[in-house]
Structure formats: C-alpha cells, structure tokens
Amino acid sequence: MSRKPGDGPMTPESPKPFRRSLGDRFRGAAGPVAAGLVLGAFFAAAPALAAADKAKGAEPASIPIQSDKPIEIYAHEGIEWDQNSETYIARGNARAVQGDVTIYGSVLTAKYRKTADGGSEIWRLDADGKVRIESPKGTVYGEKAIYDMDTSILVVTGNNLKLVTPKETVTARDSLEYWQLKDMFVARGDALAVLEDRKIKADILTAHLRKDKNEESKVYRVDAFGSVLITTPTEIARGEKGVYFVDTGIATLTGAVKITRGDNQLNGEIAEINMNTGVSRILAGAGKGGESKPVRALIVPAKKSAKKPAANSKKRSEKIN
C-alpha cells in the first residue's frame, strides 16, 4: 500500500515500515541536499543527555558529542526516518555538526528511544565509510565509528586508523577509542604515538587527560602495554610495560628491558629514560620467576682507523735500498 504526503504515521499493524526521506523534500535544482536538521526540534535529546552528564559528574564530551548543543545533520542523498527501528539515517557524504566538532561519513545513523516523559533521546550515533571526526584539538580518521552515549565511549575502527593533533600523531591497527568519563584515549593493536623526533610503540597505548590552569584538557600520562618500544634520536629502548609522564619527559620501562645506543647495550628489569635530555639509567629487579636479575652491559670499543704511512717515510726506505 502506497502512502501519500500528509498521511499520518503508521500504526504497529501497518504492513510496511514508515520511512520518511527528507531528500525529496529538500532537494534543490542545484544538486545535493543540504537538510540541516537541528535535533532539538525533532526530539529532546540535549536536555536528557546534559542531565545524565551532570549526574555522572562529567563535562560535555569534546569528541564527538557536546550534549548541551544542538546537532545539525547534512546529507547529499537524503535523510530517512525509520520509526520501527527508531533511527535516522543520513546517506551520501553525510556530516553531523555540533559546536566545533564535525563527524563525516558516507552514512550516519542516529538511534533514539522513548523517554519516560513521552519524549525521545538519541543514545547512539554510528558513522560508516570514510569516517573523519574533526575538532580544534585534532582529527580522527577511520572507516567506522560508534559513539554510545550511555557509556560515553567512542570507538573508531577500520583500516588506516589515525589521530592527528598539532603536536602528535597516533596510529593503530584495531581501534582508536575515547572514554569520556575516564578522560582517556586508547589505541589498540600496533599502536604508535609520534611526538616530533620521539616515538612510543606498543600493543596498547592509553593516554590520560586532565585540565590545566586554563581549563583545557591535555595529555599528562601515557601507558604502554605489550612489546613496548621507545625511540629517541640517540637510543632505542624495549620492555614489556611502560609509563611516560609528559611534564617531566621521563619514561619508565619494566620487564626484560633493553636499551641500545649505537653498538652499546644495557639489559635489566627497570629503566628510566629522560626523553628530553637523553639521559637513561637501568636497574636490576626481579624477573618472571621472582629471582633477582643483575644489570648487564655490553660496551663495544670504537674501532681504530688504520693509519696510512707518511709519504716521506716511503722516500727514506727507497734511499736505504
């Protein structure tokens, strides 16, 4: 049964799901649709989310949702409203804008639910295909993103995962995550953080944030787990676990630690590396079996270059003969 514009919403007994495409309504002669949907007009998501954030003692998230501001969604092909699945779907170079944060994707899906007061609220936002999340603090790239507003966790997956900020670049194989309530970023799978000429690589990297005196959230600590590798212009350090404090520039490695500088090598269980000064020290510690393991150093002497005989000595030998 076909439905005409102006027909009321379908009842549960209706034979087909009600899909309302805004593309036909807003499509102009110039081409793509620019349907700016302020979600505050469609449902009362913002007040409910703001109240939930206050109850949890959390600040509004910077990536990707700031719950105290309206969201505008744009799509080239159109925006559908599926009442049966309680979703809005934006297709074709879609983007969602809230404050100074923009989420891009081939398809954006917003899932909502009914509230006790008869309204509705968005509880999940998905982005699929050529995902990009931009904010003044940085840009995240991936193929799929899911933001769960109940847990305040953003997970970005797919190939070529990357987070780029003015000072550092973070890449990962499995996922890039932002845990709003814990003020923490997580990179999983061959995670690599590059800061100028310094690098930290591990199976998992976690970056912890806190507010500075200007009330800006900044990374103050980075934890590394599994196959940790730290690279500076002068040395390479390996270990099983590591922690790096940004303010001091000091990284501490534990577990089968190995520091290599040129041909020289230091082995131990604990190492402190000052990534600002290049000064390192390695300490003994208990190994996996609990026994104490001493520090071992391998120092390779510099090779002496062979000296060429002086020209005048050659002439003297010729005269003697």
Image (tube, rainbow, N blue to C red):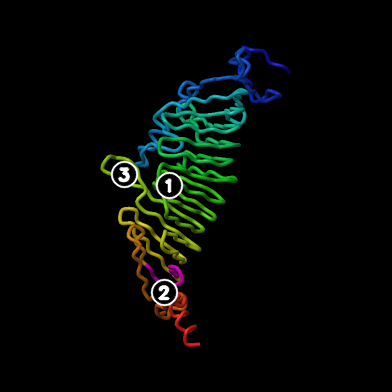
What is the distance, in whole Å, between disc 1 and disc 3 at their CAs? 18 Å
Q: Amino acid at mark 1?
A: Glu
Query: What residue is pinned by disc 3?
Result: 211
* Classed neighbour count for the residue bearing mark 1: other residues with Cα under 10 Å, few (<14), some (14–19), many (≥20): some
Query: What residue is pinned by disc 1?
Result: 168
What is the distance, in whole Å, between disc 3 and disc 2 at their CAs? 36 Å
Q: Nearer the viewer, mark 1 or mark 3?
A: 1
Q: Is residue 222 above or below residue 11?
A: below
Q: Earlier in the sequence, mark 2 or mark 1?
A: 1
> Which residues are drawn in magenta?
258-271
- Indicate the secondary structure of the residue bearing disc 3: strand
Q: Nearer the viewer, residue 83 or 64?
A: 64
Q: Position of residue 259 (x, y in %)?
A: 43, 69
Q: Is residue 20 above or below residue 59?
A: above
Q: Nearer the viewer, residue 103 or 265?
A: 265
Q: Which mark is residue 268?
A: 2
Q: Earlier in the sequence, mark 1 or mark 3?
A: 1
- Indicate the secondary structure of the residue bearing disc 1: strand
